[in-house]
Image (cartoon, helix red, strand yellow):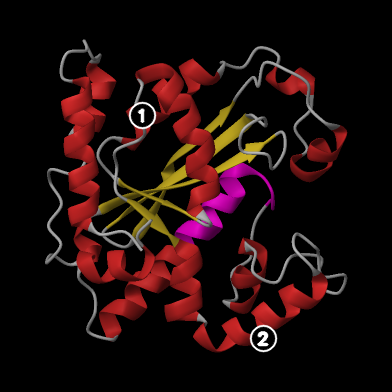
């Protein structure tokens, strides 16, 4: 798990490496994304951007983003009127198997912005918020590839993953059975009964009583992830572990 100290150390190294470069406004803002964070303050006091991406496939080196969805969580409340929903032109083929998952066809992204413009627009929305995703390393791999291509460094915002938040705080008793089921089914397999992988966003949302509106759309999945974040932070508060450093200790990337 990540720590605020390690995030700041990494940020310091990035600043040193890029100190001679001319950075635009978005890059300069992103470089300062950690400055306002205080690990001893309540996690509820901070603002979060909860994000999900839909892609042309699962290969983090070759697949491309086709959609980015995000919601703001401020003082524990999801601000539905401030959502982010952006189609992205992947600049290449869209495998039929990916279309069957997210429902985005080539004609829908033909006039959409390409990756460079999309990451700029997303950075404007993100600001210095704490970034949250379910299985965050997957989403960050795609977003950071765009970020590296555009600015030469990764997104500097603190990142939180709701997957370990589910496994250790919200549904710890389910982890054993889910791991055994996943092992029996094989890596990447789907449960024919529930029609989803046992450790997926859909599985955890189901066990938490959260209905995902328009599953496998970036906005729909981001909204479900935001609701999981709400419950996780609330439970940490009730357990007397509601500080930002407690959240990072459990779910920091």
Q: To which residue does mark 2 refer? A: 177
User: At x 49% / y 50%, what residue is drawn?
Assistant: 137
Left-right relation of 236 to 82? left
Which of these two is toward me, 26 or 138? Answer: 138
Measuring from the top left, give residue 201's x and y in whole percent: 61, 62
Q: Quadrant of residue 10?
A: top left
Secondary structure beneath label 1: helix
Q: So how many labels did they put on this image?
A: 2
Left-right relation of 252 to 191? left
Secondary structure beneath label 2: helix
Q: In terms of sequence position, does the residue under pointer 1 or pointer 2 come before the other? A: 1
User: At x 35% / y 35%, what residue is drawn?
Assistant: 155
Q: Are marks 1 and 2 in contact (CB under 8 Å)?
A: no
Give the magenta-colored segment's residue range: 214-227
Query: Crowding at label 2, few (<14), some or many (≥20) Cα neighbours within 10 Å?
Result: few
Task: Please name which of the two marks, 1 or 2, marks the residue nearer to the observer.
Answer: 2
Q: To which residue does mark 1 refer? A: 123
């Amino acid at each position: 798990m990540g720590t605020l100290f390690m995030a700041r150390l990494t940020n310091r190294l990035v600043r040193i490496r890029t100190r001679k470069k001319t950075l635009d406004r978005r890059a300069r803002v992103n470089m300062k994304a950690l400055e306002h964070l205080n690990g001893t303050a309540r996690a509820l006091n901070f603002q979060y951007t909860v994000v999900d991406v839909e892609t042309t496939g699962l290969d983090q080196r070759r697949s491309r983003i086709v959609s980015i969805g995000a919601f703001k969580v401020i003082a524990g409340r999801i601000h539905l009127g401030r959502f982010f929903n952006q189609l992205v032109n992947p600049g290449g083929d869209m495998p039929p198997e990916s279309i069957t998952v997210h429902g985005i066809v080539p004609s829908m992204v033909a006039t959409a912005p390409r990756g460079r413009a999309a990451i700029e627009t997303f950075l404007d929305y993100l600001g210095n918020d704490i970034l949250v995703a379910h299985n965050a390393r997957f989403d960050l791999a795609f977003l950071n590839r765009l970020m590296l291509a555009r600015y030469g460094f990764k997104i500097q915002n603190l990142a939180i993953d709701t997957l370990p938040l589910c496994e250790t705080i919200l549904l710890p008793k389910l982890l054993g059975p889910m791991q055994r089921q996943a092992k029996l089914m094989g890596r990447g397999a789907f449960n024919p009964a529930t029609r989803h992988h046992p450790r997926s966003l859909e599985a955890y949302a189901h066990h938490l009583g959260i209905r995902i509106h328009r599953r496998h759309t970036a906005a729909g999945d981001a909204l479900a992830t935001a609701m999981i974040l709400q419950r996780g932070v609330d439970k940490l508060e009730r357990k007397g572990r509601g500080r930002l450093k407690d959240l990072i200790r459990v779910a920091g990337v």
